[in-house]
Image (cartoon, rainbow, N blue to C red):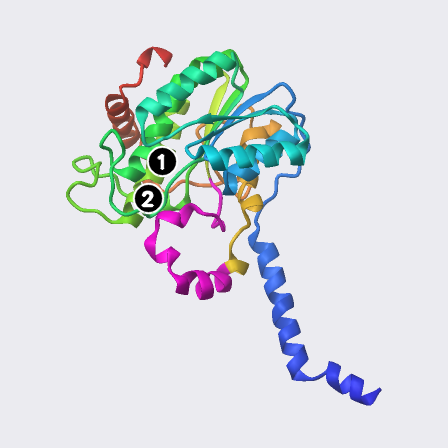
Amino acid sequence: MCIFLDCLTSPWLIWPAVTALLLYFIREYMQGGQFTKQTDESGKVVIVTGSNTGIGKETALELARRGATVYLACRDKQRAELARKFIIKETQNKNVYFLELDLSSLESVRQFVVKFKQQQSQLHVLINNAGICYAPKGRTKDGFELHLGVNHLGHFLLTILLLDLLKKSTPSRIVNVSSMMHAYAKLDRDDLQSDKSYNPIEAYSRSKLANVLFTRELAKHLAGTRVTVNALHPGVVDTEILREFTLAQTTFVKTFLKPLFRPFVKTAKSGAQTTLYVALSPELEQQSGLYFSDCKPRELAAAGMDDQLAQWLWAESIKLTQAPTEQL
């Protein structure tokens, strides 16, 4: 018995156990706010961009579980079909569909909207979730800087083209997945496309600032329509969003650094909670132009509150995408 007690009180057992317990509680704490309210989304039609993996997939999964008709708007057909079949199997909801959407191509955005409108006459929730992060310098098919084109301009055009259905389906919602990184960004009116200089972190941050500026300006245009639009920060989440970031794909980072940081980041399921809260919470039905994190409203950074900059970006986005203004 004494030998057994000595083993239990040995530092070789106690410290690993204490460390493991501490890491467990840290990981639980880092999961952030959870949307636990039960809602019935039967009869609702929802689009989730970038929903074949990560936050988008978890969002689509929960929406299907709650009875919604869900459209996976993705670029990769094979991965989207795998996600669609998985969601149907998990939820027993057969109303889960895939439509191809490449946000780096405005023509693809237009074709997506045409096909969607051929299948549906209503849209209750549009979740602009897809994005790229810290990618090397590149251009979209239309010649836009890659982060700006995919994360902002593609979603900008998609949203404008779907406003007629959203207005027919009120109360309806638009959810823009942004990031806390918007706080570290500045939009250069003379170099919106990063032609003069390029830094992937700055480019990503600028696109996330564009998301919140778009959200606030669109909310003004939609005032009184019962269509709301809000933005959010999902948290630091363990997903594939860094797949374009070369450093993050190195063996050293994947093998050694990523496991060390895992207790301090959210799972994809936890990362989807604020999206679900903003998309579904009854208490937000009349709230628009706001910014959320961990299922709570948060203050935007100063740049995100710049009304003149938001108006300029709106006009520039209309010009670049040639979005129809009659929807507004």
Coordinates of residue 267 in the picture (x, y in percent): 55, 49
Element at badge 2? Answer: helix
Coordinates of residue 213 in the picture (x, y in percent): 35, 32
Q: Which residues are magenta?
A: 233-261
The residue sitting at 34% across, 10% down in the picture is 326
The residue sitting at 41% across, 18% down in the picture is 113
Residue extending farthest right: 1
Residue 135 shown left or right of residue 230 in the figure? left
Query: In the rendered image, which quarter is residue 316 located in?
Result: top left
Magenta region includes residue 263: no
Element at badge 1? Answer: helix
The residue sitting at 64% across, 82% down in the picture is 12
- The kind of residue on which mark 2 rests is Tyr
Query: In the rendered image, which quarter is residue 24 located in?
Result: bottom right
Coordinates of residue 151 in the picture (x, y in percent): 36, 35
Asked if labels 1 and 2 touch by Cβ distance under 8 angstroms, the answer is: yes
Badge 2 crowding class, 10 Å Cα cut-off, few under 14, some 14 to 19, many 20 or more, is many
Query: In the rendered image, which quarter is residue 205 located in?
Result: top left
Residue 193 shown left or right of residue 65 in the figure? left
N-terminal-most mark, 2 or 1:
1
- Which residue has dot 1 on it? 151
The residue sitting at 45% across, 35% down in the picture is 50
Q: Is residue 192 above or below residue 69?
A: below
- The kind of residue on which mark 1 rests is Asn
Badge 1 crowding class, 10 Å Cα cut-off, few under 14, some 14 to 19, many 20 or more, is many
Can residue 277 be seen here? The reply is no
Residue 204 is labelled as: 2
Magenta span: predominant SS is helix
Give the Cα separation between the discs numbered 2 and 1.
Answer: 8 Å
Residue 12 shown left or right of residue 59 in the figure? right
Q: Quadrant of the C terminus?
A: top left
